[in-house]
Amino acid sequence: MRLARQLAWSWVSLLASAAACTGNTPSDELQVSSDTQELSAAQRKAHVTAIRDVAASEGLTNGAVLGGIAVSETGLVHCWSDATWACKGPASPSCGGGPVIAGAGDGACSLQQGGLGMFQFDAGTFSQTLAAYGSDVLTLEGNIAQAVDFVAAKVKQDVPGIASRAEALAWINAIPLIKGEARTEKWASILACRYNGCCNTSTTCTTRRAKYRDNAIDILAEFGPDFWRVTPTTGTMCQAVPPEGRIIDQGDACYNAGGNAQFWRPEQSTDGFGGDLNWTMTTDKAAPSNFATWKLVVAEPGVYTVSVHLDGGTFGQSKKAAYQVTHQGAAGQVTDTVVVDQTSKAGFVTLGDFEFSGAPGEQVMLGDNTGEASATMTKLLFDAVQLAPVDPNGPGPTPIDENTAGQGGCSTTSNTSGGMLAVPGLFAFGALLLRRRR
């Protein structure tokens, strides 16, 4: 199991607890100035590591180009606690349950209209932004993944000959980040136009373009090309779920653990799928301190049975494990919450049948805030998730064992707010007309 990769992102929270081009006038952004509370060296390293690794899992292996955006927008800050001069956004588990950073360029903080998080996602008010992009944008990892989707979409839109997301990412991965080089300058122009609406040759827009370019060049030099460049492998890239389905275990690149690193516990256990599992203690807090997501990218849209692996109560002791399944609904993405008694069975337990479209944001998420207080010393299990296709003309998939949702002690409640959850997950994706304003 690659726990090191998972905990590299978790350290961010430990330390932190501590638009379409619509015109020629740049949108006001979060101004990073000498008044900014600078991140510590350890925090800065953790944040750029998260940018590098999350971007690589999405197919963007030239992470410094994304790091330059983060420096330009927020100085690499994601949590308000690291920049208390800014506005407070909604609570995030990546911030120890505290608020994410929010922009103030759209008016008073009380209006709740600023961009959210490190990459400043903004579709209006906070609630409108969460409805458009999904609450995953509140987590550091989700904010980074959304930024990958955004820049890929804009390169596809603005670079002639780019017809797919894969081609857009290949174009981005080949940016050399050299001042005056054609592709580097084109990249800076795309960002100034699509991020700030600064699409002309005015002095202001020239300055904006130079800012994005120079910040990327500087952060490349700060950590070195060897740090930033990643060679994609099946271990670093989240692989799609094939038509016949597959199992996503903790060592899979589609599995991501977040929160406070010191509270994650890996175990070698014959009761865990593949001989291992993760666990942490439950809490009765409003927001999770530790959480994990299983990213579900289906190669073929359709209805799939989703099952989770339990160990019969050895490490899975929660009777209120709330698995949140984000999937395709009648009017877009929705999230269903299925509560499972983890002590009820050993083996795979079915959460239900869900439709998946293959769009970003489809996932299973589990947080430690089950309602079972820390004082109860209740262990919460994180193990494999299985997807199996449902044959519309047949009796349904054959599960690995005979468990069902009822036998697993599950009950289901639905959230049809387009994925706007009180508890954030990761990697949700908004509408095609992406927009950023500060």
Image (cartoon, rainbow, N blue to C red):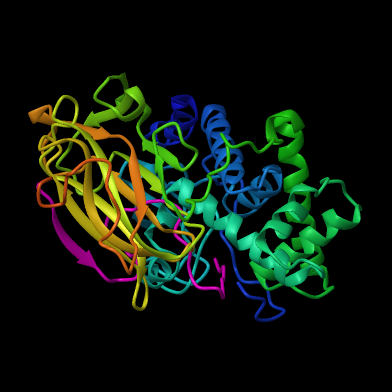
**Residue at 66%, 38% in the rendered image:** 232
Front position in the image: 35 or 335? 335
Q: Main secondary structure of the magenta part?
A: loop
Whether residue 79 is situated above or below residue 201 in the rendered picture: above
Magenta-highlighted residues: 409-438
Q: Residue furthest top?
A: 268
Image position of 437 (left or right of 68):
left
Of the 4 image quadrants, the one containing the N terminus is: top left
Residue 141 visible: yes
Q: Based on the displayed image, in which of its 4 quarters is residue 265 positioned?
A: top left
**Residue at 9%, 29% in the rendered image:** 375
Q: Is residue 424 magenta?
A: yes
Instruction: Tell me residue 201's x, y (percent).
Output: 84, 73
Instruction: Tell me residue 332's x, y (percent).
Output: 39, 73
Q: Residue furthest front?
A: 394
Q: Based on the displayed image, in which of its 4 quarters is residue 248 positioned?
A: top left
